[in-house]
Amino acid sequence: MDLKLRDVAELLNVSETTIRRWISDSKIPYYRLNHQFRFSRNEIENWVLSCKQGGDFSPFDKEECEDEPMKLGTQQFGLYRAIHKGGVYTNVPGDTKEEVICNAMKLIARDLSLDADVITELLLDREQLMPTALSNGVGVPHTRDFLLQDSYDVVALVFPQKPIQYGALDNIPVHTLFFLFACDDKRHLHLLAKLAHLSSKQDNLDFMRRQPSKEKVLEAIKNWESNLRPIGSKEAVLV
């Protein structure tokens, strides 16, 4: 049980009151330890993924959240910085999820001076545990067994040559992949939750389907993060 209530609230950009309500409604996995709520990072990660794969409940629907400012903190522009470091890759070939991941990692690992074979194996192992699709044609390949040794996070945005089947519960082929590599567990979960929030809006999905350039992606992400509004008011979109 490595996360406290305030940690989960901060990472998911909601209030502690909202987390308590989800606990009361049995919508979020939790434990009680010495009369305090505790959460497993791995279970929260799986919960974020499963909520976005077509379940009846999604924590990113505004009606599920308080009408109050999002708790962005020092990581408000964390996704912008991570994509700036990771880059954008278009027309990555592959007829299957495995082929696209392998081909994408050859490019990403080369640019980041990482071992492509080792990380590809870790990514594929993670996919066997649970597909990392967020529904609506978006996937977030990542692994729990690898953290960057540097003090920055990396998100590499990959557009396959053609949409691929990814094992998502909604059965929609994936057209956009965010390869996620963080330097610590909490920042990993924060970025995963932010990507889920980003992909919950149709306008953002339409923007990604156009396979924009890195320059356009960074401009859009920066504007999106800077204009995240209080939950319950009009949502920020990429375009």
Image (cartoon, helix red, strand yellow):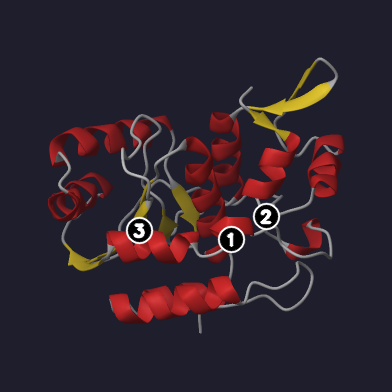
For marks 3 and 2 on the same chain, the one whose residue lies earlier in the sequence? 2
- Residue toward you, 72 or 117: 72
Question: From this viewpoint, which residue is outermost toward the bottom?
Answer: 239
Where is residue 117 drawn, in percent x and y? 14, 36
* Mark 3 surroundings: few (<14), some (14-19) or many (≥20) residues within 10 A: many
Residue at 21% of width from left, 53% of height from top?
A: 100
Query: How far is mark 1 from mark 3, CA to CA?
Result: 15 Å
| Picture disc at residue 177 | 3
Tell me, yes or no, if residue 238 can be seen here. Answer: yes
Question: In the figure, residue 156 lies in which quadrant?
Answer: bottom left
How much space separates mark 2 and mark 1, taking CA atoms? 10 Å
Q: Is residue 148 left or right of residue 76?
A: left
Position of residue 54 measured from the top left corner of the image (x, y, whole percent): 59, 52
Quick one: label 2, few (<14), some, or many (20+) residues within 10 Å? many
User: Which residue does the numbered mark 2 point to in the structure image?
Assistant: 13
Compare marks 1 and 3 and give the one earlier in the sequence. 3
Relative height, residue 93 to residue 20 (above, below):
below
Q: Earlier in the sequence, mark 2 or mark 1?
A: 2
SS type, badge 1: helix
Q: Amino acid at mark 1?
A: His
Q: In the drawing, what numbered circle is on residue 197?
A: 1
